[in-house]
Image (cartoon, rainbow, N blue to C red):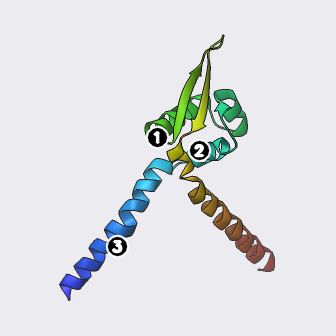
Amino acid sequence: METIEKQDHTKCKTQMVLPVRDALDVLGGKWKIAILGALFFGNKRFSELKRDLEGITDRMLAKELRSLEMNHLLSRTELNTFPATVEYALTDYGHSVQKVIEALRDWGLKHREKVVDEFWKG
């Protein structure tokens, strides 16, 4: 009996818990998914991202962009302009997250409807 329980625990951990934790380590926080979502609509400069992400500070945006670049989800390109301009774009790997974010959006919309309906009915 202990062997089956241990196998179930190991299977749960390796097939569900660890991969989800890894994903949340990369995508977690208030801003990363929002940054990726903004880039689904095309390449953007720092100032354009800041405008799209109301409330984010320059420091936080720079930190999150570095993290997403380090995890190969976006690329940073320095354009040959004066003054220097930097453009951010999703990598092919970054595009692989789109379905995950769309699923979160869909669930969020359903959850919002459920909570609001229960609030107004209750």
Local secondary structure at mark 3: helix
- Residue 74 at x, y percent in the picture: 53, 38
Q: Which residue is mark 3?
A: 12
Local secondary structure at mark 2: loop
- Residue 20 at x, y percent in the picture: 43, 61
Q: Identity of the amino acid at label 1?
A: His
Q: Which residue is mark 2?
A: 31
Residue visible at 59% across and 36% down in the picture = 89
Residue visible at 65% across and 13% down in the picture = 81
- Disc 3 versus disc 1: distance between alpha carbons? 28 Å
Within 10 Å of disc 3 (Cα), the crowding (few <14, some 14-19, many 20+) is few
Does 35 appear above or below 79?
below
Residue at the right extreme of this rendering: 120
Q: Nearer the viewer, residue 40 or 116?
A: 40
> Disc 3 vs disc 1: Cβ atoms closer than 8 Å?
no
- The residue mark sitting in front, 3 or 1, is 1
Q: Which residue is mark 1?
A: 72
Q: Is residue 54 visible?
A: no
Within 10 Å of disc 1 (Cα), the crowding (few <14, some 14-19, many 20+) is some
Q: Identity of the amino acid at label 2?
A: Trp
- Disc 2 versus disc 1: distance between alpha carbons? 17 Å
Mark 3 or mark 2, earlier in chain: 3
Residue visible at 47% across and 38% down in the picture = 67
In-image side of 120 versus 83 (left or right): right
Mark 3 or mark 1, earlier in chain: 3
Q: Nearer the viewer, residue 116 or 98?
A: 98
Which quarter of the rendering shows the N terminus? bottom left
Does 120 appear above or below 94?
below
- Residue 19 at x, y percent in the picture: 39, 60
Q: Identity of the amino acid at label 3?
A: Cys
Within 10 Å of disc 2 (Cα), the crowding (few <14, some 14-19, many 20+) is some
- Residue 99 at x, y percent in the picture: 59, 58
